């Protein structure tokens, strides 16, 4: 593990007011989103859409890294330039989703474990040759009456630690993404409790495995009430409780923290991040790594009118700029 390489990559990724753009939707997730808007879910259509995202002019002003999917890291533009070469020419870091999705956690109803450790070391070496400097691994936790269970949190945390060490041994910065799902009617307080317990478990296992914390990034959900909950919190409240949770449960020497949007309304994700940067002392760089909250307007526009690439790219740039402003508390 070369700690210098890892910390330098982290510094480039966490260069505020930039954030990370996630465009690593799996085949299944893409299928769901494409079909909903009547776009055929073919490899060529996915390539065409991702070309739009990758070639968007000036996006590098707001985005430090793109997280790609296995298919995407190997794809090219219609005129034959590799996506990686385009991102490199803009000074954007190449990230890669390396988990293989989730599977049911046996004997634990409604809980999931993330898979993909098998062959991971070889895949990391291959991705590194293709240009990847960072990776992402996501685990999901549903809030229910008795879940997430201690066992589910423990097993996912142990897997995170194995993944993170393998990445670091290959000089690839691991993004560790424990996502507390927004589904359900849980309260803000309940989300706080679950997030806090889970972060404790994740960092306990990362430390046990000697993961180099300054050479990794945490990608987390915000502390918010469930989507079906009647309780609606202001950005100030979300910011206050999320920062309290992170300050209490995330080590100060971690490389940085970024948020996923997780099905929040686009503007909600932006305003919540903005509120976190209003007069708050933060021990770590804190930014965004949204997928939907940045892509949504561009995706909808392209689905409706695939020929208007520059129109969709302008919408992408606007969303990226809004979140960039939010990462310094200047979004209005
Ligand atoms: P969303 O911002 O759409 O939740 O996506 C972020 C991500 O990378 C999920 O794994």
Image: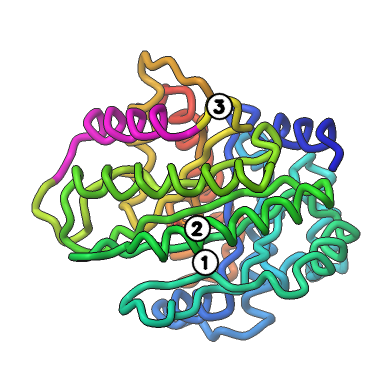
Please say if the residues under marks 3 and 1 sit with CB atoms less than 8 Å apart: no
> Which is nearer the N-term, disc 3 or disc 2?
3
The percent position of residue 314, horizontal first and vertical second, equals 55, 48
Give the CA separation, mark 3 to mark 2. 27 Å
Within-10-Å neighbours for mark 3: few <14, some 14–19, many 20+: some
Tell whether 183 sits left or right of 27.
Answer: left
The percent position of residue 244, horizontal first and vertical second, equals 33, 28
Please say if the residues under marks 2 and 1 sit with CB atoms less than 8 Å apart: yes
Q: Please identify, in this view, whether the residue under mark 3 or under mark 2 is nearer the observer.
A: 3
At 66% across and 40% down in the image, what residue appears? 216
Find the magenta span and give its range. 232-250
Within-10-Å neighbours for mark 2: few <14, some 14–19, many 20+: many
Within-10-Å neighbours for mark 1: few <14, some 14–19, many 20+: many
| Residue at numbered disc 3 | 285
Q: Is mark 3 within 8 Å of ligand 1?
A: no
> Which is nearer the N-term, disc 3 or disc 1?
3
Label 2: which secondary element: helix
Placement of 317 over or under 137, stated as above or below: above
| Residue at numbered disc 1 | 302
| Image quarter of residue 129 | bottom right
Label 3: which secondary element: loop
Residue 70 in view (yes/no): yes
Q: Residue furthest front?
A: 208
Placement of 261 over or under 109, stated as above or below: above
| Residue at numbered disc 2 | 298
Q: Which mark is residue 275?
A: none
Give the CA separation, mark 3 to mark 1. 33 Å
Of the 4 image quadrants, the one containing the N terminus is top right
Placement of 200 over or under 68, stated as above or below: above
Q: Is mark 1 within 8 Å of ligand 1?
A: no
């Amino acid at each position: 593990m070369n700690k210098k390489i890892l910390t330098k990559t982290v510094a480039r990724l966490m260069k505020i007011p930039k954030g990370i753009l996630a465009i690593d939707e799996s085949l299944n997730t893409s299928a769901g989103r494409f079909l909903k808007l009547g776009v055929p879910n073919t490899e060529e259509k996915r390539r065409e859409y991702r070309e739009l995202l990758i070639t968007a002019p000036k996006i590098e002003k707001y985005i430090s890294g793109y997280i790609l999917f296995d298919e995407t890291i190997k794809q090219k533009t219609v005129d034959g330039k590799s996506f990686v070469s385009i991102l490199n020419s803009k000074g954007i870091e190449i990230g890669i989703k390396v988990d293989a999705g989730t599977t049911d956690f046996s004997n634990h109803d409604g809980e999931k474990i993330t898979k993909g450790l098998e062959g991971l070391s070889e895949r990391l070496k291959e991705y590194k040759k293709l240009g990847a400097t960072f990776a992402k691994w996501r685990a999901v936790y549903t809030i229910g009456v008795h879940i997430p269970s201690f066992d589910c949190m423990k097993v996912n945390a142990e897997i995170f630690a194995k993944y993170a060490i393998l990445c670091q041994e290959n000089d690839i910065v691991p993004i560790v993404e424990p996502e507390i799902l927004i589904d359900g009617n849980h309260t803000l307080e309940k989300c706080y409790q679950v997030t806090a317990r889970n972060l404790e478990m994740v960092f306990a296992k990362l430390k046990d495995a000697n993961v180099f914390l300054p050479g990794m990034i945490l990608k987390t959900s915000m502390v918010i009430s469930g989507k079906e909950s009647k309780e609606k919190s202001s950005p100030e409240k979300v910011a206050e409780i999320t920062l309290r949770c992170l300050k209490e449960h995330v080590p100060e020497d971690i490389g940085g923290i970024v948020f996923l949007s997780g099905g929040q309304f686009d503007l909600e994700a932006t305003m919540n991040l903005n509120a976190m940067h209003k007069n708050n002392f933060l021990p770590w760089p804190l930014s965004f790594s949204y997928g939907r909250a940045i892509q949504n307007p561009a995706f909808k526009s392209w689905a409706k009118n695939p020929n208007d690439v520059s129109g969709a790219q302008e919408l992408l740039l606007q969303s990226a700029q809004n979140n960039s402003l939010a990462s310094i508390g200047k979004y209005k």
